[in-house]
Amino acid sequence: MSGTKVDGETVLRAACTGDAQALYDVTAQSVQGLAITHYKPEQLEGWMGERTAKYYEDVIAAGTTIIAEQNGEVLGFVDSVPGEVTRLFVLPKASGRGIGERLLKAGLEAAAKEHPGPIKIESTLNAQRFYERHGFRAIQQGYFSHGLGGDPIEIVLMEMAR
């Protein structure tokens, strides 16, 4: 995946040791900047819960996280397991530039390995239309509680048939 062009100087690469703080920062900034119209201030404030950069070290260690980077700055990332895209976050300033779409494609490819069935995602309310444009359909409403503190976050469980 290293060096795959996204747009201009933006490349996709596997996350590596040392990227944990950047993943934490992208998540926090994405939540605060892109989810603000769909969630209450208290939910946004508690979204990250007790999560720290160390949490993302464990995510990176699993070896399934792909980063979009430009000039040394991490603009977004995606993570997946067989059958599910588990995380996709993009900095607000990078939103609308095709980076999320390219990350989703990479995440879908990884999620499809060793999984012949539909691919699932727990979408935030603000990202639902993005996923619908890329072939996902809503299955049910629910709550995502990451287990690290904070109020439960409303999500839409979505699925993409293959």
Image: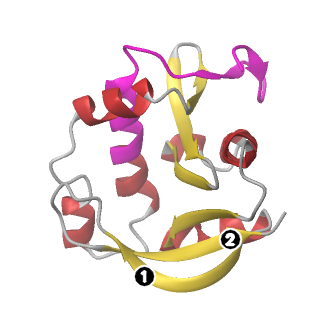
Q: Which one is nearer the viewer's eye here, 25 or 53? A: 53
* Residue identified by numbered label 1: 142
| Kind of residue indicated by mark 2 | Glu
| Kind of residue indicated by mark 1 | Gly
Query: Does 127 appear above or below 101?
Result: below
* Residue identified by numbered label 2: 159
Work out which quarter of the rendered image holds the C terminus and state it.
bottom right
Residue 87, x across and y down, in percent:
50, 49
Query: Does 71 appear above or below 139?
Result: above
Residue segment shown in magenta: 1-28
Q: Is residue 143 visible?
A: yes
The residue at the point 26 percent across, 31 percent down is 53
Question: Splitting the image into 4 quarters, where does residue 118 fall?
Answer: bottom right
Residue 77, x across and y down, in percent:
54, 37
Work out which quarter of the rendered image holds the N terminus and state it.
top right
Mark closest to the chain's N terminus, 2 or 1: 1
- Judging from the image, what secondary structure is the residue with disc 1 in? strand
Q: Which one is nearer the viewer's eye here, 105 or 9? A: 105
Q: Badge 1 local density, few (<14 within 10 Å), some, or many (20+)?
A: some
CB within 8 Å, label 2 to label 1 = no
